[in-house]
Image (cartoon, rainbow, N blue to C red):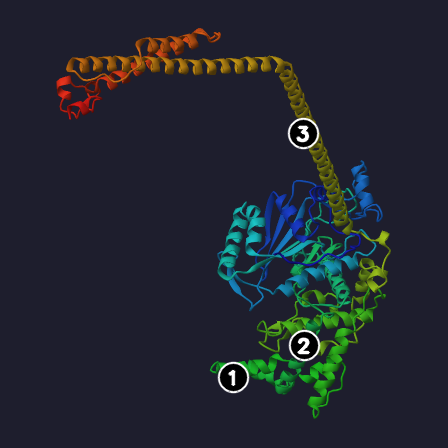
Amino acid sequence: MPSGRTKKAQKQHGGMKLSHAAVKYLIDRGKDYNELTLIRLLIANTNSIRVVYDASTYSFVFELTTPGKILIDPFGEDLAASAATRAAHAAIAAGAPEPGTPVSTFCAKISFVHDGDSLKKKYDVSLLKTVTKKTVTRIKANKEAATQCMLFEEFACLRTTAPFVPDVIAHAILAGADFQAIFGGILSSTSDSRRIYAWINEWIASDGIMIDVNLMEMLDFQRTAPSVPRTEQFTMIHRLSLRSDLQNYTRAALRMMAEIAAVRGKGIMPHDFHEGNGMATKDGLQLYLIDWGGIFDLKVPADLQHLLKMFNDMCYDSYDTCAAANAGATKEIQAMPKSATAVDIERMTRIARFPSLSELCGFFEIKFRAAQMIPIISELNTAFGQRLTAYVDFTCETPTPQNVHSALMMVAFVDFMVNRMDFNYPYCQCGSVLKVVYPDKVVAPTPSTTHGLSVTAFDDFRLFLDAFEVGNFSSHTRLLEVVAIINETVQICPSACGLPLQAQDLRVDRWINDEIKRREKEEAAARRLEARRLAEEAEARRLAEEAEARRLAEEAEARRLAEAAEARAKKAARRPETEERAKKASMTGEAEARILQDAEREARARNAAVAKAKEKTSRDRLFALSTASGIAKPPTKSAKSEVAEIKSAIQAIESQDPVAVPRSLLSRLSSGLSSGFSSVSSKFRNLSFPWKKRGGTRKQCKQHKQRKSFTQRRHN
C-alpha cells in the first residue's frame, strides 16, 4: 500500500487548492480525500510532461500540465473569500465566481526509496555526463515532505500570499506496480521522459525499490495580483550571477539568506541550500527555496543526536591531529615532493583537513587551553549543543541583526561540518550566497588549507572559523537588509507560536471528507429506506398473493361443496327411479332364478321320465328274452301305471303359473334345455348300451364282463 504524510486536519490559508469542479468530482463519486486520490486525479488529468532536472543525486523533477481547471492559486485574494470551506463550495455551486487564479502546471519530484542500505545506480544525463542516483530511506522521504508541508503552513499564517516554501499538493511512497499503473502513461508520452521511465523500471525490477512521489506547486511564473497574467519566469539565482548587472542577484541572494534564517528559526537546520536550490524572478523580488531533502529537524531526537555525535567526533579528530593548528602543516603539504607516498599525502591531508580545537574555540568564543584538551572538548560539546538548540522563531519574535547573525553562523557551521568529508576540501553549500551578507569577508582569495586552491572564508572551513565568531559580527554587513526582508516575508503569527487560531480563520480541508461521509451516510440511509420500501412492497405482494391464494382456495372449496350438494340433489332426485330400476332388476333376477329353477326341475323330470321309459324298454326286452328262453319274468309295474306316472309329471309341470320371460332369456333356456336333453339322452344311451360308451360295437363289447342278469340264477 502507498504511504505518505498525513495532512493536518486544519490547514491554514494559502497555497494550491482544488477547484470547485475537482472537489465536486471527489464528493459525487465518494472518493476519499487523501494523498493517493489526489495523485491519481492530477496524473490522470495530465496531458503533457517536461523534464525539468535529471542530474540530481536523489531525484528527477518534472513539470506536468493539465488541460482542465483542477488547481486554484488563491495568491492575493481576500482571506475570508478564498477559504476553501463548505459554505464557499455551496456559494460557487450556486453561481458565485470562484476566487483565485486557475493553475495548469504543477511539479512532480520523483525519488527512490529503500529501507536497507543505500542503493546506487548509474544514470547517463548526456553522452558526456553520468551521475550516480541513490536511494533514501522511507523515514527521510516522509520527513522531507512533512517538513516542507509544515513550513508552508506555518509561514502562510493568516495570509493568502504564498510563502517562500512551495506547497505540497500530495505526497506518497508507491510500490513499483502502483507507480507504473499511475505514471506509466504520461511518462511514456515523450522520448525524454520515456527514457527515464525505462531506467526507473529497470531499478524497480532489479532491486525492488519504491518510488517517492512529491507533487508540489510549480514555480514557473511569478505570483502577482489575482487574475493578472503571470509572465515573469522563475530561474535559479546562480544564473542571475552570470549577468553583468549583479544588483538583482544581490537582492535575490539576500532574500534567500533571509528565508534560510527564518527556516532555522523553526528548528530546521539545512545543509544543502546552494544557489541551484533558490528559484527567483529576474528582479530578485520573489524567491522560493526548493529541494528540502538536505535538512535536520532539531525537534526530532534522532536528528539532534546525529549532529551532536558528528561534532563530538570532529573534536576528537581535531585533538588527534592538533598539529593542524600549526600553519606549517599546510606548507609541508604544498612542499611535498612528487615522490611522496600516498600514505604520507593522506596523512598530511587529514591533518590539514580538520579544524583545530583552537579554531573551534575561537568560533564558539571559548578560551583555548592547550594543556586541557579533554575539558576543552567537553566545553565545545556543551557550547555547540546550546547554540544548536537556541533558535529564534521569527514568526514569534522580532528579528534583529544579532539573532539573525547567530542563525546564519550556525547554518554555515553545520553546512561545513556535514559536507567536510564528501569532497577534496571542506566547503559550505550556502557559502556562495552567504558571502553577499558579509562583503567585508570577501577579501583577496587565500590559498586553501587543503590543496592550495584560491578560496575565500566561505569556501574553506578553517578559513571560515578564523574569520567569524558565532556571537559577534563586524559593522560591514548587510544584516539589516536581511532583517528587513524577514519582516517583509514573515509575519507574526499566533498559531505558529502555539496559540490556536479560531476555526473560521483556518482553511479547513477536512470538510471535504466530512461532506463525503455525510453524503455516504445519506446515501446509505436512502439505500436503507429503499431496501425497506422494497421489503415492504415484497411483503405486501406476499400478503396479497397469500390472500389471493386463500380466496381461490375458498372459491374452489365453495365450488366443490356446491358440486357435492348438486350431486347429492341429483342423486336424491334420481333415487326413486334408481330404486324402481333396482326393484325391476331384482324382480327380473328373481323371475330368471325361478325360470332357471323350473327349467332345471322340468329337465330333471323329463330326464327321469326318459330314464324310466328306457328302463321299461330294457325290462321289456329282458322280459321278452327271458320268455323266449323260458325264464320266469320278474315282477314289474304295469305299463299303464308307468304311463300314468309320466303323464302326471308332465301335467304337474304344465300346471305351474307362466312367468313373463324375455325372449333372449327364453332362447337361452331353450338352447340350454336342448343341450341338457341331448346330454341326458347321451348318458342314457351310454347306460343302455355299454359298448357305445367306449365307442365300439356290440361284438367288441362281448369281451367285457357281463352284468349278472336277473335270470342268472336260473342258469347256475
Quarter of the image where one finds residue 158? bottom right
What residue is shown with label 2? Answer: 463
Q: Amino acid at mark 3?
A: Ala
Mark 2 → mark 3, Cα distance in angstroms: 106 Å
Q: Amino acid at mark 2?
A: Leu
Can the viewer see residue 91 in this picture?
yes
Mark 1 → mark 2, Cα distance in angstroms: 24 Å
User: Does residue 403 appear left or right of residue 686 in this picture?
Assistant: right
What residue is shown with label 1? Answer: 344
What residue is shown with label 3? Answer: 549
Mark 1 / mark 2, whichever is N-terminal:
1
User: Does residue 400 appear left or right of residue 204 in this picture?
Assistant: right
Percent coordinates x, y for residue 255 in the rendering: 75, 60
Q: Amino acid at mark 1?
A: Asp
- Compared to 431, does 587 lie above or below? above
Percent coordinates x, y for residue 521 in the rendering: 75, 45
